[in-house]
Amino acid sequence: MFRWIVQHINKSLGQSQSSVNFIGVIDIAGFEIFQKNSYEQLLINYTNEKLHQLFKDTMFVEEQKEYLDEGLEWKFIDFGLNSQPVIDLIEKPNGVLGILNDVCRFGRGNDKTLSDRLRTSHYENSKFIDPTSKALHDFSIVHYAGVVDYSVDGWTNKNNSGINQSVVEILANSENEIMADIWRNSPISSMTDANGGKETGHSCHKTTHHTSLKTVAQDYKHQLSDLITLLSKTKIQFVRCLKPNYEKVPEVFDPLLILEQIRCNGVSEAIKISCEGYPTKIPIHDFYERYGKWFSNRKPSNLKNESEFPRRYSLMKKRLKICKTFLINQMKDRDLEETERQDYWKREKQRLEEEIETERKAKDSIFNSRKQLEKNFSDMNAKFTSCQSENEMSKKTLWILKESNSNLRTEIGEVNAEKDGYYDEIASLKLKVTDLEQKVEHSKKFNEDCEKEKEKLESEKRQLAVSVENYRTLIHGLETKKKELENEIEVETLKNRNESENKKKIERIQKEYDENRKQLRKREEEAVEKESQLKILKNSVKAANETIDSLRKKEVEDQRRLLEYQAENEIVKAKYEGINERFTKLQSAQVEEKNKLDDARRQIRRLISEKDMLRMEKESLQKMFDKLRQSKNM
């Protein structure tokens, strides 16, 4: 559509391009080197390689060939800017684009197949670099602007043309004139005609379909070839655009960046060949106007172009030879004069350089002397300043020493006071240790008293056990007597014995019963008294335990404070260690006493349990007596 619009605009403007001259401007993107370079970067860099080769042929090869054709004394110079190896690597049938077209045309390949085929086909090419296994790209090409790493990801899809050839043929044969005109003159239709006009749209064979498939690489290569052919037929003026900086900031020039671009684009070589060659090129018309008197006294009026001149004036070759000889002699004379002039200016330049060098040395000497004086003056000022600063520093140091001396005295007094405090603390700790020792001795005596009381209680317990056993024997005897009495009562009831004897017996039994009851009450009172004694003893044990716990807490606190004082003051470390050992001994002794008290507690608990058992036995005896009383009353 765009091409069709351009053609109609040119047609409406007037004359056809074949009958008039034209001025064209071609503007393409610069060389592209990105972090990831794909198919688009390859085509752009391929175009730059073609234009660079055209620039090289125009500026260097054609220019030097013209010098040789003119018969000038010229030695051919090879500037080493040949891009043809890279172009062959890309556009030849077995090149990158050719292999890509094969992979896309047969339809069985993918990006991996393309990468493998490229490496297999061009691993020996110096412009093709096969990457290592850890590289993120697939291959590299050495362009004139540097090495570019390419990744073939998606190349097969990008290279396939989006329009089938059958669709193009249908659109070209459309009844709509505009649509048919657009597609009839499209590059795809023209390429089909160039291939021999093979009809592939009506064929359903798979191989024929893939053979007729057109790719983006084919279209691009065809269009680029037409462009280079057109440019070769014109008089080209090259304009090189240089990037001044990477930041895109105005009036900022990066010399290294600009120099690299000039080197890559061949600008320096173009300047060199212009300086080495003959920059003045006079056209034939201007030459005839200037030197026409050597050929004839009149100028031909119907001389239209340069091609008519040698044909119509072939008879003047001899005069042209004479003119050429004259010009050569004139040029030799001018060269001789130029040589003499150059020698003169060379000597004059050398003389001026010597004068400038002498003046420069004198100025350098004056400058060095002045610089040395300034340096000496600055050194003196620096020394004076350093002396002043050292004086100030010495004063400050003296004042700081005085202040530090007074501070040290104060700190020494504080340390002595703290030391005295430590000694006082040690003395108080000694007193506390003595007090603790006394308390431990008291606790030992108290434990001994508890042991004695315990033995006494055990003896009383044994006595009570004997008494209980006696009571049991007595009760057993009473029961026996009761049975006997019952038997006697039965016998007396049966035999009707006299009542006086029975009364005597009853009185006697009552007396024995009263005596036993008195003894039982006495034993009960003794048991109550023993129980109160046990309670008092239990309270004493509890008080002793509390005293021991308080002593233990005080002992732990004193030990902690003792360890803190030991860490703070290394001087009294030995004394603290001795106190700690004494505390340890006291603690072990206290632990032993505690174990003894625990044993006493266990024994007291056992006595209490035995007391409970005695109480239960007492209650059982009381029940037995009650039964006897009831039986007596009956």
Image (cartoon, grey):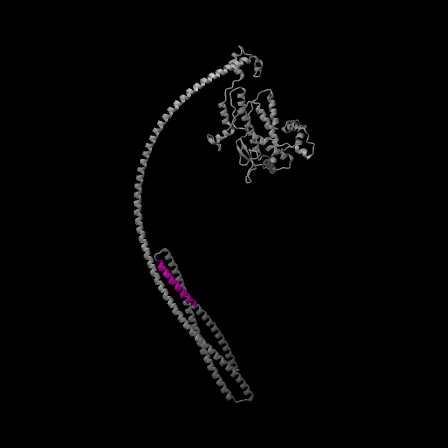
Q: Quadrant of residue 308?
A: top right
Residue 509 lies left or right of residue 160; in this view the side is left
* Front one among 9 and 305: 305
* Front one among 97 and 220: 97
- The image shows a total of numbered marks equal to 0
Q: Residue furthest toward the top? A: 297
Query: Does the rendering let one see residue 513?
Result: yes
Residue 457 lies left or right of residue 404; in this view the side is right
* Front one among 531 and 182: 182
Relative height, residue 179 to residue 601 (above, below): above
Taking the magenta stretch, the answer to whether it contains residue 584 is yes
Q: Quadrant of residue 46?
A: top right
Query: Does the rendering let one see residue 254?
Result: no
Segment tinted magenta in the rendering: 572-595
Is most of the magenta stretch helix, strand or loop? helix
**Residue 448, how many percent across, how many down?**
40, 71
**Residue 297, how many percent across, how many down?**
53, 10
Relative height, residue 437 to residue 396 (above, below): below
Residue 159 lies left or right of residue 325; in this view the side is right
Give the quadrant of the N terminus.
top right
Taking the magenta stretch, the answer to whether it contains residue 511 is no
**Residue 341, how many percent across, how many down?**
43, 19
Q: Give me the residue at 46% from left, 82% from top.
A: 515
